[in-house]
Image (cartoon, coloured by chain):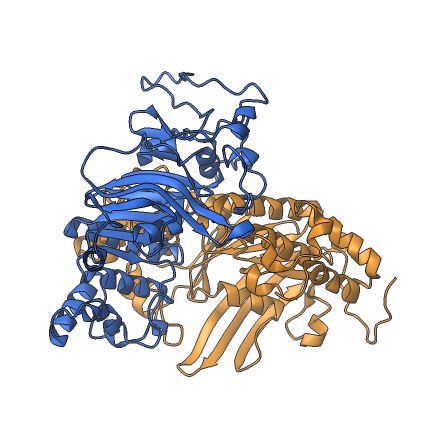
Chain colours: A blue, B orange
Amino acid sequence: MAGSGTAHLRTGEALLRADNLVVEFGTGERRVRAVSDVSFDVLRGETLGLVGESGCGKSTTGRAVALVQPLKSGRVCLEDTDMAQIPKRELRTARTKVQMVFQDPISSLNPRRKVLDSVMEPLAVWGMGTKDERRKKAGECLESVGVDPDQTGRRIPTELSGGQCQRVSIARALMLEPKLLICDEPVSALDVSVQAQILNLLQDLKEERHLTVLFIAHDLAVVKNVSDRVAVMYLGKLCEVAPPEELYLDPAHPYTAALLASIPEPDPEVPLKSVPLSGDLPSPTDPPSGCRFRTRCPRAAERCAVEEPVIREVSPGHFVACHFSLQPSSGNGSGDKTTATPSPTRGAPGEVIKKV
Amino acid sequence: MRLPSRRRELEFPSIADLEGPLLEVEDLHTAFHTRRGLVRAVDGVSFELQRGKTLGVVGESGSGKTVLIRSIMGLLPPGAIERSGRVRFAGRDIEPLSARELRDVWGTQMALVFQDPMTALNPVVRIGRQITESLRKRVGLDRDAARETAIALLTSVGIPSPARRLRMYPHELSGGMRQRVMIAIALACGPRLLLADEPTTGLDVTIQAQILDLLRSLQQERSMGMILVTHDLAVVAGRTDEIAVMYAGRIVEYAATSDLFAHTRMPYTEALLRAIPRLSEPSHTRLRVIPGRPPDLANPPPGCAFAPRCAYVQERCRSEAPPLRDAGPTHRFACWFPVGSSEGANALASNLEASLPAAVALASAGHVSPAPQTLTSTGGTL
């Protein structure tokens, strides 16, 4: 599986393009490539879901795209402008177009400040408007997220629930009227009923304000609910990119299939699947050669250790980085699979885990 | 080889001799004195657990599920706490026991797997010692025997290279590994009852599946009773025998697992099931939210605690709290206008007409529901 390859990039009007991003932490032997040659694009008005487990690099990618994480190499283009090439002053302005909402709602707000003040802050930083104008705008943003500015605005984050804090964070992110909203695990810390409220809210705001969204999460069901397109990451690389329906019905990458099979269904009649993925994540300082997923992959063969797979199209709009990808069933519904990619000779074809 | 004990240890009947339930909880109340008033975290909870069975306790933040577990074990923090009710373990009342006496219960009879291993494990003590500590003090093993047992335990929880891991510190292990270590510590002294408080929250979904399978197989191997506390209905769906749904400190519905999903009675349970985004749904499906927030436990509203957010609410609900009543031999619920009944259907219909937000949210379109509900919004009955 590789981030190498750009077959999945489109020619449409991309608000955001990330080209061959590489982010490294640490030095010498302890160096970690958190993001290893990842490219993707997000079209205007689209929601791209970036999904993966701990250590896959999705949050780092989000921060890189938000221009708060320095890159080792690669580039980030907002509205066709390379962010590394523009003068500093223009970069400052460009940053306002991109805003982030973070995972832990309570700790992403200043615990000693009233939330109304926290929401007003972005405008204050930019010296926009008078205090009254800022207060007014903050009040409007808070109302648009369902928070009462007079009652709740006066409180500090520790006096609010997780859901309320997350609404406040979203309000704060909206203050500078961004074009791109990057949500990094915005609902993982919230209860189910609150999560539903926040997800619906994000959908409403996206429509009202014509936002483009990069939605980063580990919960596949949540990501499916909000996304127009989904990209799966593993250990710093992209595995698969596809529209949500296809990804979930017909995963092409064994890792995606394993992830899907691990999700518990809230229905006791659905039989539990045997755990398809054994072992733990390999060390990020010393990732496996070739395809990084091969140490846990039921389909791994010799080629996987030697050659890193390049991302390629397996069906319209559906891209995968795998030498032995699970083939999507042909569209005529007969259920037989095209076998353009041969199964590996060594070992069983592995568990082909399909959602009916 | 047992170390001589200075006082007589509490005796419990062996599992084989056990006749009644493994655990009985009767009208348990636990309240905290806070600046805002008396917070009734657990407000009259009763249930029984048979040996070898798994009970899922499901609830959101503030439902009281964590306090319930700690109260059952007697693991409450010191301070202004009011606790009443009975807790019987293997036929013996344990709630009047002092902390000293409870030490004979913790670990050897009942054990708790905590939610966040990083905070529950001692960061400056090697894993090995954290496991062998209880083996040496409680079971009285010598150093070598304890070490052998620790290695066997780590193997049984699926940790590779266990001998090497004994020398590691918690931060050197991944989240999934740490949770396995927590489970090993909990099982070290061979408890009969395992209480797991959100054991997989925060873990990746593939690791979550492994840990849950592990708990289930260990439970079956050792014929333990297990209580699995979680906010995630999906986690309990396939892995429990019975489920208790908690809201504002009380059990609002209690049923055999398949019953709970197939014949949901309590509107809160139904609303929770509907609020979960499902893989089987198309993307951009409007989620059916539960408007509002859980009540302030220091100032709960009169009547049913869920009334302010309920799609079926009627006048009676706001003044009179419904008692738990039976819907079958193992199905109890607390509601005046339950799901699947004609009263419930009429209540929902009239609320929809009045455009009550909760009713509108529940009935909102755009969702081909896979949840096996039998109520329709036009008033059909079960």
Residue positioned 30% across, 76% down in the render? A113
**Quarter location, residue A138:** bottom left
Q: Quadrant of the N terminus of chain B?
A: bottom right
Say which residue appears at 31% left-offset and 39% top-offset: A40
Would you say A202 lies left or right of B253 here? left
- Residue A282: x and y, percent? 56, 43
B20 vs A243, nearest the viewer: A243
Q: Which quarter of the picture shows residue B94?
A: bottom right
Q: Is residue B260 left or right of residue B75?
A: left
Asked whether the viewer can see residue B94, the reply is: yes
Q: How many marks?
A: 0
Residue B369 visible to the viewer: no
* Quadrant in which the C terminus of chain B appears: top left
Closer to us: B189 or B355: B189
User: How far from the left and from the top, in percent, is residue B47?
Assistant: 55, 60
Residue nearer the viewer, A92 or A60: A92
Give how far across and how far down residue B187 sits, in percent.
69, 55
Q: Position of residue B155 (x, y in %)?
A: 70, 46
Above or below, comparing residue B173 to residue A2 in the picture: below
